[in-house]
Image (cartoon, rainbow, N blue to C red):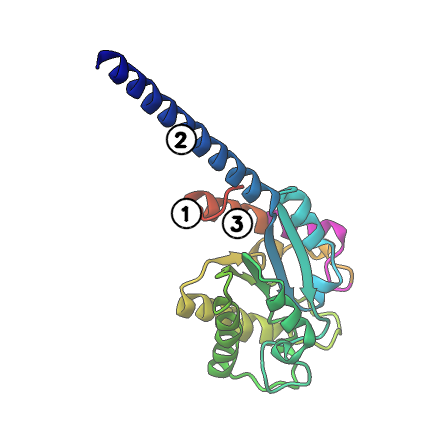
């Protein structure tokens, strides 16, 4: 009887050990799987995204565990009542099909066009609709709203006054209404026209500044409330 008990004990110990090994192997494989699947970052914007290096610079800063894709559209607006609302562009659907884990939205510059009558309530509503489209995705991405760089008065067709007095406060309202983090690249660049090619579009140096500001905001927020392993 004692011999049988000893054999049974050995069998139980072996089963427990094998279960522990199996669990360890499973956890290791799961960790490797998560690390082998990059965190998908969608950069949403206009020409300040599409025609600049900031998405690539951001990718370099984030590292190989991330995949950063540029979904900018030159001339795109938040305002639906315009010639080129972002929500009507095919790239918008491409961005959703990407199933991002993180969405960075830097729009509003083209809404400072004097041809577009300022309407804060409409702008806020249209921006919130864009955000909601992403939040409804199965991937449930985290969304960051970015206050765009300043517009310098240099004859590019955009109104600095409209941008400063209408667009920037409206974007702040959007962040408040949606309870989303707001990244400010507007204020740090106010006294740095040298970071722009033409007073509106960023040069390479300006793109790197913007990428660093966004990167620091992302990392700070993700570290304080992580949902993805870096």
Q: Which quadrant is the N terminus positioned in?
A: top left
Q: CA distance from mark 3 to mark 1?
A: 11 Å
In this figure, which residue is indicated by the disc labeled 1? 225
Q: Give the extent of the magenta segment.
A: 198-213
Occupied quadrant, residue 111: bottom right
Reply above or below: 12 against 52: above
In this figure, which residue is indicated by the disc labeled 3? 218
Residue 74 in sight = yes
In this figure, which residue is indicated by the disc labeled 2? 19
The reply, left or right, for residue 179 in relation to residue 209 is left
At x 71%, y 75%, the residue is 75
| Magenta stretch contains residue 209 | yes
Check the image and name the residue furthest to the left: 1
Q: Mark 2 or mark 3: which is in front?
A: 2
Mark 3 crowd level (few <14, some 14–19, many ≥20, 10 Å Cα): many
Quick one: label 1 or label 2, which is nearer the N terminus?
Answer: 2
Q: CA distance from mark 1 to mark 2?
A: 33 Å
**Which is more toward the observer, 222 or 215?**
222
Residue 150 in sight = no
Reply above or below: 127 against 150: below
């Amino acid at each position: 009887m004692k011999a049988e008990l000893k054999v049974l004990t050995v069998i139980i110990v072996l089963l427990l050990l094998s279960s522990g090994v199996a669990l360890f192997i499973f956890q290791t494989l799961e960790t490797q799987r998560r690390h082998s699947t990059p965190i998908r970052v969608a950069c949403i914007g206009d020409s300040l995204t599409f025609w600049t290096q900031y998405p690539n610079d951001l990718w370099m800063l984030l590292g190989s565990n991330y995949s950063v894709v540029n979904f900018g559209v030159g001339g795109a607006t938040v305002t639906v009542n315009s010639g080129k609302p972002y929500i009507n562009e095919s790239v918008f659907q491409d961005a959703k099909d990407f199933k991002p884990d993180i969405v960075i939205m830097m729009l509003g510059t083209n809404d400072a066009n004097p041809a577009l009558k300022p309407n804060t309530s409409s702008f806020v509503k249209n921006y919130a609709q864009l955000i909601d489209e992403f939040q409804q995705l199965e991937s449930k991405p985290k969304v960051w709203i970015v206050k765009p760089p300043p517009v310098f008065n240099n004859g590019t067709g955009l109104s600095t006054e409209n941008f400063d007095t209408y667009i920037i406060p409206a974007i702040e309202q959007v962040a408040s209404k949606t309870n989303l983090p707001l990244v400010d690249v507007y204020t740090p660049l106010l006294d740095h026209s040298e970071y722009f090619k033409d007073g509106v579009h960023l040069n390479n140096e300006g793109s790197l500044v913007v990428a660093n500001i966004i990167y620091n905001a992302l990392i700070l927020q993700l570290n304080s409330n992580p949902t993805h392993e870096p």
